Amino acid sequence: MRFLSEEEELDPITTAVNLVDVFLVVIAALIISIAQNPLNPFSAENVTVIKNEGEPNMEIIVKEGNEIKQFKSQGETGSGDGQKAGTAYKMKDGSMVYVPADEQNKNLK
């Protein structure tokens, strides 16, 4: 009983065809991984990615349409001059509610 004839055993094109099939599968996997990346330049979604949150080397990447901006932390606490713009409250379910200060109540405080 023979499984392969001598012609099939010596034919080098079958090996090349098998390699092409493997490369096609690898290329398809790469294209799918690029398409699912949140910073994909071809998607129209707005995305914000925060790396190393709360660490001195924190990095924020913001994608708005086709524009990608990258902000790197200097490891310092920010400061500046300004005025109170409102109050934020954390609800029991974990959501945040921001209440802007109106002009009448700003002068009372």
Image (cartoon, helix red, strand yellow):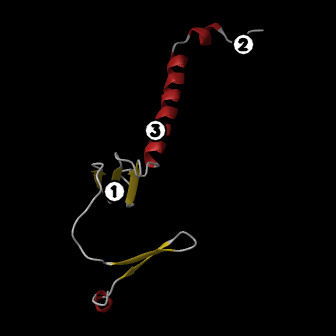
**Label annotation for residue 30:** 3
Q: Distance between the residues labelled 1 and 3?
A: 23 Å
Above or below, comparing residue 84 to residue 45 in the picture: below
Q: What element carries label 2?
A: loop
Q: Give me the residue at 51% from left, 23% from top.
A: 19
For marks 2 and 1, the one nearer the N-term is: 2
In the shown orientation, is residue 11 left or right of residue 35? right
What's the CA distance linking mark 2 and mark 1?
Answer: 59 Å
Q: Which amino acid does label 3 sit on?
A: Leu
**In the foreground, 19 or 63:** 63
> Which residue is depicted at the point 32% across and 90% down?
105
User: Where 1 falls versus 50 (above or below)?
Assistant: above
From the image, tell me which residue sits under label 1.
62
| Kind of residue at badge 1 | Val
Number of disc labels: 3
> Quick check: 24 above or below 15?
below
Q: Nearer the viewer, mark 1 or mark 3?
A: 1
> Camera-side residue: 3 or 63?
63
- The local crowd at label 1, few if under 14, some if 14 to 19, many if 20 or more residues have their Cα within 10 Å, is some
Q: Residue 103: image x %, image y %?
A: 28, 89
Q: Is residue 104 left or right of residue 54?
A: left
Residue at screen point 43% across, 52% down: 38
Determine the image quadrant of residue 18: top right
Label 3 packing within 10 angstroms: few (<14), some (14-19), many (20+): few
